[in-house]
Amino acid sequence: MDLPTPPPPFSATARTVAATTTVVVHGEVDTLTGPELEGTLTAAWAAAPASLLVDLSAATFVNASALAVLFRASATARARAAGFDVLGLPRPVERFLAGRQLTLAVIVA
């Protein structure tokens, strides 16, 4: 009998190019790993970037805990008048947010 494959390990790494910091997320973002993502985003904001991009393209799972972290980061962006966007949000999550007229992006003119 084959054992189930464990989920890929979670990681969130930040890199800054020009005035934009990109946080790349791998693995599952859930109740257990959400605080680690939040810590990475808090550290990224500490560097005062003009814009923060969260890349979830390599995330294998995103739940409501992850959305809460992302909405707090979006609120931080608004408070700082900084740009904020999320790339690679799973399609069902995008549809859920759109159906409720919610957005995570903050566009600064």
Image (cartoon, rainbow, N blue to C red):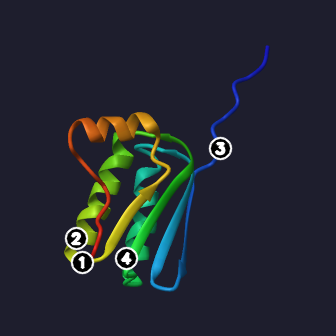
Q: Considering the image in quadrants, where does the N terminus appear?
A: top right
Q: How far apart are marks 1 and 4 (CA)?
A: 12 Å
**The C terminus: image quadrant:** bottom left
Spatial separation of the CA atoms under disc 4 and disc 3: 26 Å
In the picture provided, is 61 more to the left or to the right than 50?
Answer: right
| Residue picked out by circle 1 | 81
- SS class, disc 4: helix
Say which of marks 2 and 3 sits in front.
2
Q: Are the residues flagged by discs 2 and 3 in contact, CB closer than 8 Å?
A: no
Rate crowding at label 3 as few (under 14), some (14 to 19) or many (20 or more) other CA atoms within 10 Å: few
- Going from N to C along the chain, the mark reached first, 1 or 3, is 3
Residue at coordinates 23% horizontally, 47% vertically from top-left? 102
Asked if residue 107 lies left or right of residue 27, the reply is left
Q: Which of marks 2 and 4 is nearer the N terminus?
A: 4
Q: Residue 78 carries which label?
A: 2
Q: Residue tagged by mark 4?
A: 45
Q: Which amino acid does label 3 sit on?
A: Pro
User: For the residue marked with disc 2, what is the amino acid?
Assistant: Arg
**Tag 1: amino acid:** Ala
Mark positioned earlier in the residue sequence (4 or 3):
3
In this rendering, which labeled residue sits more in front, label 1 or label 3? 1
Residue drawn at x 34%, y 47% is 67
Q: Is 20 rendered above or below residue 70?
A: below
Question: What type is the residue that disc 4 sits on?
Answer: Trp
| Label 2, label 1: how far apart the Cα atoms are | 5 Å
Instruction: Evaluate if marks 2 and 1 touch, with contact meaning CB atoms under 8 Å apart.
Output: yes
Query: In the figure, residue 94 lies in which quadrant?
Result: top left
Label 2, secondary structure: give it. helix
Residue found farthest to the right: 1
